[in-house]
Image: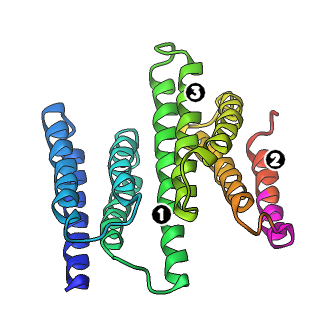
Amino acid sequence: MKYAWEYIIGGGAAVISLASLLLIQFFPVHWVVWPVLIVWVGLFVGTYILTKKHLEWKEGVFTLALTTIVSTTGLLGVMSFTSLRILITCFAAVVLGCIYAFGVRAHISTWLGKKAFFRFMMIVWTFNCFAFLVLLFAFYTFFPGTFSFVLLMVLGSLIYGVCSMMVWRLYFDTHWQPLFSWALVIVCIMAQYIWVVHLLPFAYTLLACICTWLWYIIQLFVRFRLSKKHIIWKKQQHFLLGNGILFILFFIFFVRWV
């Protein structure tokens, strides 16, 4: 019966998400978008509340689902390519279905399954960071001068800091306070990095990708640092070398004017 609930809730979440995203895109007017978004969020909240008494939900699943709804809706609002919109719509529907399907499992039977689940959650948080940064850069592009970029820079860095703590909480059963200092470090680093990146003559999607790329690497190594084994540098040599080469190639071929 437990697995039947997983399929029902996960499949229902995916279908509702797909229908909501399609309605928002086919009828991009305020009197359609906002009611659909409210009903969509309401169904997810209602499902969580009604089943919480009978099913054990994993920590962070509900927050991740709501964040993904908001980030995906905003991202589709600034995407102009039809193929990308279709891809993001299908991706978001599948992801939200998986989040709610995995979320009602009481236990993860094996360490491999637990590790895979955490990686999946981390990937979705990374996608949300990217989507929110796309929105910030798009807002600055479409409405220059409306707000100082310093405000958008602070908001973007705070998004990275909060998402970092959400990712770390997946791996460490601890209070928020020990993670806050490291999140503050990430906020400071990303604020400076966002300021530098926004000077590059790229589209807002590429600017968000560059920022999220660095954030992913930093939060990953902070997580390793917080673990009992700390950072095992020998195991990270290929990862660092590969990212370093890609980063250099990117600036050689795309940022020739630097």
The stretch of residues the image draws in magenta is: 232-243
Check if mark 3's residue and mark 2's residue have beta carbons within 8 Å.
no
- Residue that appears at 56% across and 57% down: 174
Q: Which mark is residue 121?
A: 1
Q: Amino acid at mark 3?
A: Val
- Residue that appears at 65% across and 48% down: 215
CA separation in Å, label 3 and label 1: 25 Å
Look at the numbered disc 1 and give the secondary structure of its residue: helix
Label 2 crowd (10 A; few <14 / some 14-19 / many >=20) = few
Q: Earlier in the sequence, mark 3 or mark 2?
A: 3
The stretch drawn in magenta includes residue 100: no
- Against 218, residue 104 (above or below) is below
Q: Residue furthest top?
A: 145
Q: Amino acid at mark 1?
A: Met
Q: Which residue is mark 3?
A: 154
Q: Amino acid at mark 2?
A: Ile
Please give left or right for residue 254 compared with residue 137 in the image: right
Label 3 crowd (10 A; few <14 / some 14-19 / many >=20) = some
CA separation in Å, label 2 and label 1: 33 Å
Check if mark 2's residue and mark 1's residue have beta carbons within 8 Å.
no
Tell me which corner region of the image, top left, top right, bottom left or bottom right, holds residue 225: bottom right
> Residue 173, position in %: x, y?
54, 62
Q: Earlier in the sequence, mark 2 or mark 1?
A: 1
Between 72 and 43, which is closer to the camera in this rendering? 43
